[in-house]
Amino acid sequence: MRTCSRVVTGKRKKRREARRGSRGITVSPNQSGATALELIPAVSAAAGSAGAAARAASTPSQGSTSATTYGRTRSCIPRRRLLRRAAAAASVMGVGEEDGSADGMRLVQLLIACAEAVACRDKSHASSLLSELRSRALVFGTSFQRVASCFVQGLADRLSLLQPLGTSGFVLPAVAAAAAGAAAFDEKEEALRLAYEICPYIQFGHFVANTSILEAFEGESYVHVVDLGMSLGLPSGYQWRRLIQSLAGRHGQPPRRLRITAIGLSAKKFRSIGDELGAYALKFRINLEFSVVETNLENLRAEDIKICEGEVLAVNSILQLHCVVKESRGALNSVLQMIHELSPKVLVLVEQDSSHNGPFFLGRFMEALHYYSAIFDSLDAMLPKYDTRRAKVEQFYFAEEIKNIVSCEGPARVERHERVDQWRRRMSRAGFQSMPIKMMAQAKQWLGKNKVCEGYTVVEEKGCLVLGWNSKPIVAASCWKC
């Protein structure tokens, strides 16, 4: 008996339903014309829906290839499905060529398509898309054009590091990276200083940390702060100058001795900061003892830190611990266990509140695109279009983070930001207990006092304080005890 050729197997049926599902994504046209920050979630949803539809077809279609990420093999998307995903994104935009935001919409679609091509190791198609992206993503353009230029750099770097199809991993250009890093050191230093002065994110972390440390030191005569990363190596020790002022002006007597231990590899720079802080503390009649432990966090041991009997200890971590998060998670666990051994009265943790450490490249890419679009939108509201300070902050500070997230893998990828909920779970597993931060009114006063422009928001989330831009979380501060 002849079998009908039109019988559809289960897998083929799944693929057919997936294609229909991805074509069925529609959104009303009134979603167009918003800022880049408002557009990204829609595109992300479109890409995610189309991606879910593509993944429903568990068997790769003819002409597809495979790529390996963290040892997991995913089916790359064939050209036909790639075009369907781009069409789905355009449908979600609901924008025609006559719309003023059409160029921005096109830029979003090109970024998604290029990221997918890079993920599939399709060098020819990715190179073609990068060529068009470079002509659209302008360093002095709109906020989204500027953030797109950073992602274009990251995609280009990732493409250049890819090995040919059929292999896995990346070529690590250690010599070139070291040379480039040395050449741009001064620019990065200035960009960090400008980021501190212009953006409220680091200052917000310092404000919450100092307020929490002051509470822990209340009435104590011998106090000690262990600073992981020495507040990013900012010149003049901005954070600790304010702490010294506050300790000198507190009720009762100032502490008899304040010790600060800086942890990091920039020992010479830290000692210079320590000398400045020592002279500054003398003006307030505070005895400051400053020391440096020259090591990275992964190699830090509890015995490296001198703890004196009778002193109260606080540990300060401003945008540092995410760099220790690795695929194995063992490095971070070791650091947290070491901190737990020190038995600090308070551990202040300030981190970027976003998920840039997912297992798959495309997910990280979309999350980072949404996150940094918010940051660049905030810079757009604070500084004129052609302000060179803004260009330096964007291209030498935030762009470095973006490029690391987009182009690097393995040990080279250190910008592994995670959401506050994930940090809460990590800290609890390490034996720490949450200390709810109850300073919402003070945080709002701080925003007003520092004349931060409208658009920034502070919310309390399960005992943490989260600073955001137009309700998009940017940084989260939390406090912990042993």
Image (tube, rainbow, N blue to C red):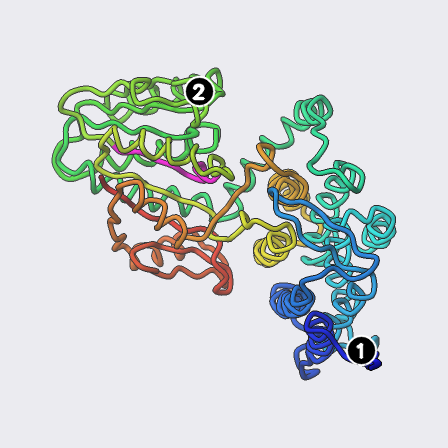
Quadrant containing the C terminus in the rendered view: top left
Tell me what residue is drawn at x 77 percent, y 67 percent.
86
Residue at the spot of label 2 = 295
In-image side of 225 versus 51 (left or right): left
| Front-most of residues 378 and 120 | 120
> Which quarter of the figure is the N terminus placed in?
bottom right
**Residue 476, x across and y down, in percent:** 41, 51
Please provide the residue range marked out in magenta.
314-322
Q: Is residue 93 visible?
A: no
Query: Is residue 72 left or right of 112 when viewed as pictured?
Result: left
Query: Which residue is depicted at the point 34% across and 22% down?
Result: 301
Nearer-the-camera pick, 238 or 24 = 24
Residue 393 covered by magenta stretch: no
Q: Is residue 136 visible?
A: yes
Q: Alpha-carbon distance for marks 2 and 1?
A: 56 Å
Which of the 4 quarters of the picture holds residue 180? top right
Q: Amino acid at mark 2?
A: Thr
